[in-house]
Amino acid sequence: MSRRPSNPSNPSNPSPFSFPSVHNLHQVLSVSAPCCTPNGRSLDHSLPFGYPREQPPDYTLPGMEDPTLFENQGNEDINLCVICQEPLEGPPQADPTLPNVLEVITVSRRQYHRWCIAGWVANNNTDPFTREEIDPQEIAALLQFRPPPPPPPPPPPPLTLLQAIRTGSLARVQRLLAVPGIDVNMADDDGDTALMRASLSGHTAIVQQLLAVPGIDVNKANNDGTTALIMVSKRGRTDIVRLLLAVPGIDVNMATRNDGTTALMMASWYGHTAIVRKLLANPGIDVNRATNLGITALWFASKKGHTAIVQRLLAVPGIDVNKANNAGETAMMLASKYGSTDVVELLLAVPGIDVNLADDEGWTALVNASRNGHTAIVQLLLAVPGIDVNHASNNGNTALTYASFKGHPDIVQLLLAAPGIDVNLASNIGRYNGNTALIWATKKGHPAIVQLLLAVPGIDVNKANINGGETALWLASSQGHTDIVQLLLDVPGINVNQVDKNGDSELTVASWNGHTDIVQLLLDVPGIDVNKANINGETALGYATVEGYIDIVRLLLAAPGIDINMKDDGGWTALRSASQRGNAAIVRLLRNAGAV
């Protein structure tokens, strides 16, 4: 971009290279302007005034003979030097030690290279603006002029106490603390004080210095309500906790504003045993204080499985081991849910522990341990006198139904050995309303659990759920669990002709889903109804024909009493269905069997 003179129509925005009042060469050459070397020429000290090497000794340049060259007439759009007619732009001067003679100078809205003006002066020995003679030495001095260096930047403002803390420099902090009137409790925009910053960063020596200042407020909280003690209890800075607790008047029970968490809760949650021990040794510590959600230090430690902390908390007189949070969850429930066996053992040793408490979902410690597969905890809980093994959650599921559904055979075995266990209890909610432990284990395909359940005297193998009317055998036949079908068929009294709410029997759904092995097992049962139709008149043979399961069609045609010409409610026979679908192999089978 070329350097342009100022716009005279806009005096409020003058060009940085404009000289509104120029009277002589002194003013022009004494003003510093940005350096510019036309055409990349370099300076040579061997030439007068540092002219370019290419510059001939004759300093008469094009346009110098024009007597009006320096008159006050110009064009705002000129981007060439008025004297040499070469571009005003160029790379910066390479050698900063050379005289600054290659600048662009604007005079009366016209622009010149400084070296061009120097050439005029050397050639004419006159001031181009006043036409007065000039002493050559004076000219040389003017051309060598360099503007004074800019003033040094102002020194940075002195560090504040908060900034000094950030550097971690004890010496700086000590110097600031010695300043009369220093506010040791000043806070930043977040409300953090010097003590909080030093504590959080682990600057123990600085914390010690700050605590020695009269008037230090150790209980001051930031915008979130967090104090220095809460911060370091969370971070595990034991040495700083010790220093803070030694301050008279420290409030160990202060809680954050957003969630109500105390220093003891933080240390318990993050597993800082040494800090918990120091906090508990402080008179007035409240071990039963809870957050806004009702969570205590014991709850935190039990959920995270911090056994040593739980042990110390339980040793405090008056600890409430049965205190629940806002969702009804106790420390025992949490430890059982997350598999903290050692914590459960500690809690069970506390007099007055209630193992049958349930949360808002109706889940007890036993239900939690059973559904999450914590065998050792289930064993501990079942040894407690008065444990309710049949307690049902809000959806009707018990510890046994959950363990059967999740596939925990070891837990099922333990529960089945418990006195008073009821294997026929069922869930009571949604589409699974009426599912027993046997139905759940069958549906999920857990043959080992099915086998355990079938060995219990009084098990109801024909019990159906409420919404679908599905039995364990029906579900096993539908989903293809051949091994479970075999186990169920071995139970005396099993009903192989029981139907669901749509009238489909076990043989019908097995044929529909193409489970050939199960169809074979069912056909071997005496009394099987091979012609049983659902509410639409569809039979096992009709389903197998429509789906094209030729092996099942062959098995059904061989069954005694099969009605191959039986029609559904739409008047369709098996032969008609096979013909309509173009299944020639099944058509031949049916015709050979006498279908018409």
Image (cartoon, rainbow, N blue to C red):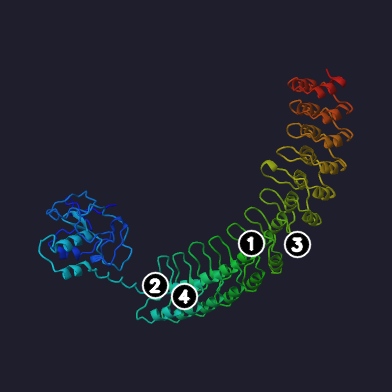
Q: CA distance from mark 1 to mark 3?
A: 19 Å
Q: Which mark is residue 168?
A: 4
Q: Find residue 330 and name its label.
A: 1
**Distance Cα–Cα, label 2 vs label 1:** 41 Å
* Residue drawn 43% across the image and 77% down it: 216
Task: Judge by depth and name the residue closer to the eye, 301 or 148.
Answer: 148
Mark 2–mark 4 Cα distance, whole angstroms, equals: 17 Å
Task: Please identify, in this view, whether the residue under mark 1 or under mark 3 is nearer the observer.
Answer: 3
Q: Amino acid at mark 1?
A: Thr
**Number of residues whose C-alpha sits closer than 10 Å to that of mark 4, classed few (under 14), some (14–19) or many (20 or more):** some
**What's the CA distance linking mark 3 and mark 4?**
50 Å
The type of residue carrying mark 2 is: Met
> Going from the N terminus, do you reach mark 1 or mark 4 first?
4
Sooner in the amino-acid sequence: mark 1 or mark 3:
1
Q: Secondary structure at mark 1?
A: loop
Closer-to-camera residue (489/555) = 555
- The image quadrant that residue 135 belongs to is bottom left
Q: Nearer the viewer, mark 2 or mark 3?
A: 2
Say whether disc 2 or disc 3 marks the residue closer to the N-terminus.
2
- Mark 1 residue crowding within 10 angstroms, few (<14) / some (14–19) / many (20+): many
Q: Which residue is mark 2?
A: 186
The residue at 35%/79% (across/down) is 181
Q: Nearer the viewer, residue 68 or 14?
A: 68
Tell me if 538 is positioned left or right of 11 in this view: right
Q: Are marks 2 and 3 in contact (CB under 8 Å)?
A: no
Q: Secondary structure at mark 2?
A: loop
Q: Which mark is residue 376?
A: 3
- Residue type indicated by callout 3: Ala
Earlier in the chain: of badge 3 and badge 4, it is 4
Taking the spot 64% from the left edge, 56% from the top edge, the residue there is 359
**Distance Cα–Cα, label 1 vs label 4:** 43 Å
